[in-house]
Image (spheres, helix red, strand yellow):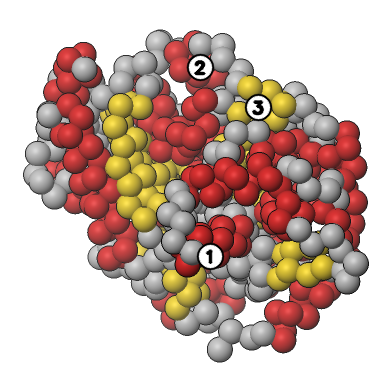
Amino acid sequence: MSDIKEIISSGKAVLGIEFGSTRIKAVLVDENHTPIASGAHDWENRLVDGVWTYSLDDIHGGLRDCYANLLRDVDEKYHVTIEKLAAIGVSGMMHGYLPFDKNGELLVPFRTWRNTITGEAAAKLTKVFDFNVPQRWSIAHLYQAVLNGEEHVDKIDFFTTLAGYIHWKLTGEKVMGIGEASGMFPIDSDAKDYDAKMADKFDALDNIKDKPWKLREILPKVLVAGENAGTLTEEGAKFLDASGNLKAGIPLAPPEGDAGTGMTATNSVAVRTGNVSAGTSVFAMVVLEKALKKVHEELDMVTTPVGDAVAMVHCNNCTSDLNAWIGLFKEFADMFGVKADMNDIYGKLYNNAMTGEKDCGGLLAFNTFSGEPVIGLDEGRPMFARKPDAKMNLANFMRTHLYASLATLKIGCDILFKEEKVEVDTLYGHGGLFKTKGVGQSVLAAAMNAPVAVMETAGEGGPWGMAILASYVVNKDKDQTFADFLDKKVFHGEKGQIMNPDPEDVKGFDSYIEEYKAAISAEKEIVKALPII
């Protein structure tokens, strides 16, 4: 306890903050990268005028409340006040669109990754670049605004992502980590910068060439892990810490996305490693040995925090519908006066699901709260269906919803592993789906037909990963690579608990996914039948 108090009071602790879809979380780590305190703020995106967004008040107030809760945790545990830190790092949901004018005013409400309103732009840019540009990418949002004739476009002085925006507010620096930048615009992994040829092609487009800006003038500067991305300003310190105790001058890491923090938190930044982050959304990333043979709309090309090429399958929907059903069971328990802990409810229902039939016994679910480009949905409607002779029991029901949470991920990854023949030694799982020991891990192993490891640190997730990235800025040895830093200073050779796929589970999930694919047309009809007014 006294050692930790000394670490905090002397300013040796490192802070990582991540803006997730449903929670903003801050994690404070010591010199051994062990979490010593945390704070959080729960929030939700809103559908406003057909756009998924968070207001600036949501963003600013959420950050301050999260940090205030961290301070409260530190005070309660160690009776000490944070005045200095060794380093800070900020991460967030990747992609999206935050455009600003020359006065720093936001021109349109934040358009998040969750929106599927850029189909025309994404398709045109994919053709122009011969490179898959997903709908959620920042460049797709920018170009769609151009195609829509939105008047704010000519006023843009700078556009960025959520992590880039917060970093700018804290430091005054318009910079971005390369992994986060790879979700704004395609990256040249050799140059460690935006792809110059593609940027030139964008600027030469008929409806772009007469704009008062060039693309690279309004994009954030690209940095790689370990580079100093500026320091906390006086204004930034006041913005973060309402108590006024935090001092300026703290170095910050390049802001990264949840993809980069996920790779970091699972030590999967080396070739032939991969990780799956499963929460509100779900994505799988594999660090590539060689380039893919062709362009696939289901596969994104992003990078590690040091710029190595990564193939990503990103799906907008994962646990939201699953959580809604769990909430229904909690409501049922409350109605009968049973005061059950939510973690206990999750644990019992998840473990019971593993006793269900391998193919879910004729039950089927779509977890699509929002659009899902992997299966061609611009909008989503959660849907549950079953055959008349289905074996409708609780185990099959819960197993169905666990499968549904990874179904679109499996469809995308089947392209990566079966068509492109990409090889991966181990996939590391992290995120809320893996909190119940062995269950999410088992389902993912069946979906991917690959070994899945979960580390004890997996539950720490993105903010812990961002704290590590921040620590790398100030604690790396001279010329030490990020992969070596992770191996030697963070994970110390730890590989986690590995689970190999059960052949019967694999067969069952394959059978389920064929029925799922056959029902996609029905899901599309439900979207039409139940319009959002």
Identify the residue at horizontal 82%, vertical 75% (top origin): 522
Q: Is residue 489 left or right of residue 284?
A: left
Q: Which mark is residue 332?
A: 1
Q: Position of residue 315 (x, y in %)?
A: 66, 55
* Badge 3: residue crowd in 10 Å (few <14, some 14–19, many ≥20): many
Name the residue tied to disc 3: 453
Q: Secondary structure at mark 2?
A: helix
Residue 291's place in the image compared with 156, above or below, is above
Q: Earlier in the sequence, mark 1 or mark 3?
A: 1
- Please indicate, yes or no, whether residue 168 appears anywhere in the rendered image: no
Number of numbered discs overlaid on the protein picture: 3
Give the distance between the C-alpha atoms of the residues marked 3 and 2, in whole angstroms. Answer: 14 Å
| Frontmost residue, 50 versus 141 | 50
Q: Identify residue type, mark 3.
A: Ala
Quadrant in the picture for the C terminus: bottom right
Residue 491: mark: 2
- The one nearer the camera, 367 or 201, is 367
Which of labels 2 and 1 is toward the front?
A: 1
Name the secondary structure under disc 1.
helix
Report the amino acid beneath label 1.
Answer: Phe
Mark 3 against mark 2, which lies toward the viewer? 3
Residue farthest toward the left in the current orientation of the protein: 244
- The location of residue 470, given as percent across then percent down, is 36, 29
Task: Classify the position of the N terminus by image quarter.
Answer: top left
